[in-house]
Amino acid sequence: MLNGMKNLSIYGAKVWVGDSEPPKEKILHVSDGFFTENPTDDAIEVNASGLVIIPGLIEAHAHLCLNAGDDWEKVQNNDSSRSMSLRMIENAQKMLRAGITTIRDLGAPTELAVSLRNAINEGIVTGPELFVAGAPITTTAGHGNFWNGEADGELGVRVAVRERIKAGVDWIKVMASGGNMTPGSNTARAQYSIDEMKAIVEEAHRLGTSVTAHAHGVEGIRHALAGGVDMIEHCTFQTENGSEPIPEVIAEIISSQTIVSPTLTGSLALQKGTELYKKRTELTRQLVEGGAQIVMSTDCGIPGTPHIYLSYALETMHDMSDLSAIETLRLATSTSAHLLSLDDRGKIKTGLRADLVALNEDPTVNLAALRDINFVMSGGSFVHR
Ligand SMILES: [Zn+2]
């Protein structure tokens, strides 16, 4: 799928580099997988006239092992490790073809996620660059326990963090509240005590790794904040009546600079015009206008959210937040790269990885252009489409 790395000069396109400025005509030079200031002597010229080039997209919350269908549970239960691995490869490659050149996988069997990441890095299989959490840490019978990540008590969760670091994960994910896909778990309540959350964060930070916490209901969000996590997934303030943000908790998210990964799922767009959508919009505005640190994410792989739905999530964010299309796009490129500490990507700039998407129309005018792809480049190699 990747067409070997070449030294290139791409000319004729308008380029949006990932900042606040609209696209401008610019020649891009690529050598050994990175953007360079000048062309090399052997550079091949690529005519990209009429196209708009943007940095490769970053999906901050994916589940490569899930099939995005209503039958996910049956499929997952019947998967062998081998078939699940193959599913993960196919989903990763689908995302790459859709211009998503970096993915954070936040829930899969640890060994499968780590070995796929390594296989991509070693060039054994082609795919986007992966950063993986493996099996989320959860309480016995807690949310996502089907990934076999259960751990209880302060000692138990410390051991769980150490095991994951030993296995080679990039992030620690903890289920701070119950989840909608796990019957018997409770989204309204915290799963772990504050002391358990503190133990997870302390242990992860001691070993140089960051922690992100799945949290829907306000109690889970409160415990995640009190535990000192680096990031909160969903952060929906979910109640039986939809999102009901608590001002003092929103203020704490913003003042503590805890990153929010809002997982704008495919089903949200279908709720447009409903009370639920209105309430989620209100929450999103409070976070955006308050200056919260936000990365773009979809929770892709869950039912109703196919792996390539990041462009739809960007449209939902644009609609809910009132951010301009450019400011919205930054959330899935330069801003995400910065907040995820991936400073080698996210912009089109000399010295950074040559991850880019060439589009037939201008996404800074209309985000739907993200689905009209001409070509994708990952680390300086063309992606076969
Ligand atoms: Zn998820």
Image (cartoon, rainbow, N blue to C red):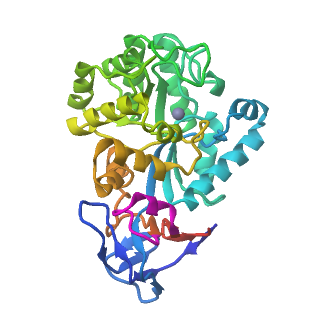
Q: Is residue 269 magenta-colored? A: no
Give 280 or 343, whichever is nearer the viewer.
280
359 w.r.t. 164: above or below: below
**Looking at the image, can residue 334 be seen?**
no
Query: On the rendered image, what quadrant is the N terminus found in?
Result: bottom right
Q: Point out residue 106 in the picture as x, y percentages from the top left corner.
A: 52, 36
Find the magenta span and give its range: 359-373
In the image, taking residue 217 as reference, residue 252 lies left or right, namely left
**Residue that appears at 41% across and 45% down:** 316
Q: Choose top left, top right, bottom left or bottom right for residue 229.
A: top left
**Residue that appears at 47% across and 31% down:** 172
Q: Point out residue 284 in the picture as x, y percentages from the top left corner.
A: 32, 35
Query: On the rendered image, what quadrant is the C terminus found in?
Result: bottom right
Number of marks in picture: 0
Q: Point out residue 328 in the picture as x, y percentages from the top left corner.
A: 33, 51
**Residue that appears at 77% across and 42% down:** 82
- Furthest residue in direction front, as rendered: 273
**Residue that appears at 43% across and 32% down:** 274
Give 351 or 77, whichever is nearer the viewer.
77
206 w.r.t. 184: above or below: below
Q: Choose top left, top right, bottom left or bottom right for residue 112.
A: top right
